[in-house]
Image (cartoon, rainbow, N blue to C red):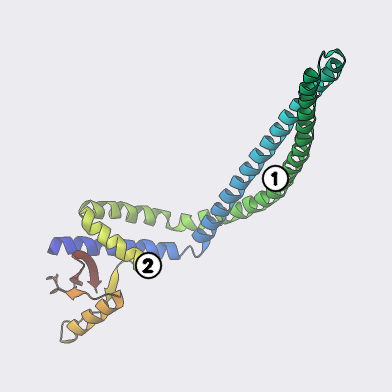
Amino acid sequence: MKNKLEYLFALQLIDTELDTLQEQKGDLPFEVQALENELAAMRARQTAAEQAMRQAFSNRDTADSDIVGLREKLDKYKGQQFSVRSNREYDALTREMDAATESVARLEKEMAALEIQATTARTEMEELKGKVEVIEKQLAEKQAALAEVSKLTEEEELQHQHEREKAIARITKQDLAAYERIRKAKKLAALTAKAHANGQRLRRLHETARAFGEFLEIHDPAPCPRDGPDVVWITRANKYDLAIHS
């Protein structure tokens, strides 16, 4: 238990250092991420608009080709009207001509609508192109600024990342998952509080438990090195969450 908690506390210290380095970059990482997300969304809209335009033009061309074929049939039917031998043949031919005429009218309306769709999509593409260019310029500026700031902390970050990998290798997946859950929920390296070696210890631990937001069963702190952190395991719903008190 002691080694387990010491490994988790060591990971917390590393993550705290990494968080501090990230804070030195200010809002640049978040601004870069936001612009990258916005740019990706714009490009997706560009792709969708282009596909819509191409599909509309393709459907329009297909309708135009169908109209040409129907008009050829109509000319053929008109010529056959003079050679029919019975009223039955004449009526059948008339029905074919009426159907072809209706199809031509329907396809012409579809062509007009498809032309509007294609034009709308093309207009959207042009508008998005300008917006994408603006975002790309903003993103390039923010990325350059972030790269400049990152140079100052790059070596130190790499060192801490290496230390973090070694620390994680000593921690079980279950314990790491509990640690990361608290870290993510609280947006801190871990749930922390000040604990004292005197009678205030239990009160402080209960304060920590209440801060966690649920009823928690508090176990005795594990032994720690002299002047080291006091560490306590807190049980919730049969799962272990780590609270480190320093």
Q: Is residue 36 above or below residue 204?
A: above
Residue found farthest to the right:
82
Q: Secondary structure at mark 2?
A: loop
Disc ID at residue 187: 2
For label 2, the crowd category at 10 Å Cα-Cα, with few meaning under 14, some 14 to 19 and many 20 or more, is few
Q: Amino acid at mark 2?
A: Lys
Q: Are marks 2 and 1 in contact (CB under 8 Å)?
A: no
* Residue sitting nearer the eye, 204 or 165: 204
Q: Is residue 232 above or below residue 178?
A: below
Residue at left offset 46%, top offset 58%: 152
- Tell me if residue 16 can be seen: no
> On the picture, is 166 further left or further right than 39?
left
From the image, tell me which residue sits under label 1: 125
* Residue sitting nearer the eye, 212 or 187: 212
Residue at left offset 70%, top offset 44%: 121
Percent across and percent down for residue 126 are 72, 46
For label 1, the crowd category at 10 Å Cα-Cα, with few meaning under 14, some 14 to 19 and many 20 or more, is many
> On the picture, is 137 further left or further right than 98?
left
* Residue sitting nearer the eye, 186 or 5: 186
Residue at left offset 78%, top offset 18%: 89
Tell me which numbered mark, 2 or 1, is placed earlier along the sequence: 1
Q: Amino acid at mark 1?
A: Met
